[in-house]
Image (tube, rainbow, N blue to C red):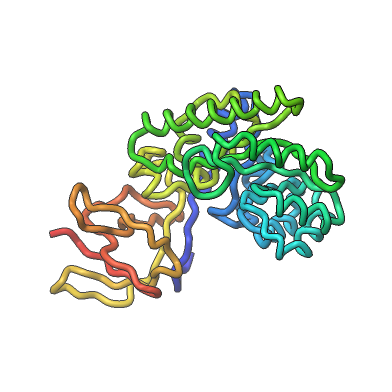
């Protein structure tokens, strides 16, 4: 493979092994996998999931849903609070898909969807179980109940369940990840039981995040999980013990454009527009880095991580690699 500009290289065997591993756990738990496709946003990687029997997916925007709908995915959840300004695109999607599943967390969204939808869609209520980003806080049951009752009176909305995202599992402690997972399961189960007592049965529970889904073996209690990054993994997931080095299936091949021997640095073509700007710490020091070096093999795979060379800084179009003395 000839590399002339920053290029993502995927280790297919590793990626497919991660898909199969997650599917095995889901099968043993007797629930469904609805993988989040926002990490790769690739029709090619999507086919790898389809080859293993996956037919339901998650995305994070209407635009992303349109992309995958155009690649013959027919059951899509947009796991982001609905943007009513995109109602025209939402209607087009609903007509094209077998099942379009949307998120709401307020009555205004319900009213707008009911008035403007041209085809019935399925609705999840977004629940905040501690991440404190979006969703109705899990303790506010009355607020949740108001939405469920309101949806039961609509023609275009079918309430199917409660959905949550545990983004606060990004911690180095696997024990803490497990605690968050089981705490989330308990909170969501209580909400389901409360709704059942109010006459709303068969409420589904959807859970998503890669760190805890990577280390938990049994997901019973939830109806589906929505991890996304697990198909590729990365240094962040490796650092917080969600995966092993052998599970990382993506690397970025970048041309070298300059060398500075006096500083033991090289400059590569590949910056903030090609990589993430997320950073990690060098051991226990305060110094940050953005990636490690690996040696590319002839077959497109790569060797072990070389921790003596790391990405020191990042700009829009280029990065600096420094060798540790």
Taking depth in this image into account, of 119 and 308 the one nearest to the observer is 119
Q: Is residue 5 above or below residue 218?
A: below
Residue 137, given in percent of the width and then of the height, sits at 54, 40
Taking depth in this image into account, of 8 and 32 the one nearest to the observer is 32
Residue 206, given in percent of the width and then of the height, sits at 62, 36
- 81 displayed left or right of 263: right
Image point 83% across, 56% down: which residue? 115
Taking depth in this image into account, of 242 and 220 the one nearest to the observer is 220
Q: Is residue 192 above or below residue 81?
A: above
- The answer to whether residue 47 is visible is no
Image point 28% across, 67% down: which residue? 313
- 124 displayed left or right of 135: right
Image point 60% across, 57% down: which residue? 42
- 147 displayed left or right of 253: right
- 324 displayed left or right of 51: left
Residue 151, given in percent of the width and then of the height, sits at 78, 42
Taking depth in this image into account, of 273 and 300 the one nearest to the observer is 273
Q: Is residue 79 above or below residue 85?
A: above
- The answer to whether residue 197 is visible is yes
């Amino acid at each position: 493979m000839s590399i002339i500009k920053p290029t993502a290289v995927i280790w297919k065997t590793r990626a497919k092994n991660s898909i199969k591993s997650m599917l095995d756990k889901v099968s043993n738990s007797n629930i469904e996998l609805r993988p989040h496709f926002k990490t790769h946003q690739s029709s090619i990687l999507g086919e790898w999931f389809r080859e293993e029997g996956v037919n339901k997916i998650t995305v994070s925007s209407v635009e992303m849903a349109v992309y995958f709908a155009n690649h013959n995915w027919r059951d899509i959840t947009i796991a982001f609070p609905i943007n009513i300004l995109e109602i025209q695109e939402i209607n087009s999607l609903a007509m094209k898909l077998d099942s379009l599943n949307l998120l709401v967390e307020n009555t205004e969204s319900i009213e707008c969807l009911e008035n403007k939808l041209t085809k019935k869609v399925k609705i999840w209520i977004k629940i905040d179980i501690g991440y404190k980003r979006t969703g109705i806080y899990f303790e506010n049951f009355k607020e949740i109940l108001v939405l469920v009752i309101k949806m039961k009176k609509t023609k275009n909305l079918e309430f199917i369940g409660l959905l949550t995202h545990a983004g606060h599992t990004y911690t180095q402690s696997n024990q803490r990840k497990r605690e968050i997972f089981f705490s989330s399961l308990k909170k969501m189960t209580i909400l389901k039981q409360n709704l059942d007592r109010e006459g709303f049965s068969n409420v589904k529970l959807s859970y998503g995040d890669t760190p805890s889904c990577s280390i938990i073996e049994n997901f019973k209690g939830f109806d589906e999980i929505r991890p996304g990054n697990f198909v590729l993994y990365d240094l962040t997931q490796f650092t917080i013990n969600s995966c092993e080095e052998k599970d990382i299936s993506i690397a970025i091949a970048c041309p070298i454009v300059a060398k500075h021997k006096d500083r033991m640095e090289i400059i590569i073509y590949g910056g903030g527009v090609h990589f993430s700007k997320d950073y990690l710490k060098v051991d226990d020091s305060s110094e940050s880095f953005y990636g490690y070096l690996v040696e590319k093999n002839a077959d497109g795979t790569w060797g072990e991580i070389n921790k003596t060379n790391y990405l020191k800084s990042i700009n829009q179009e280029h990065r600096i690699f420094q060798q540790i003395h």
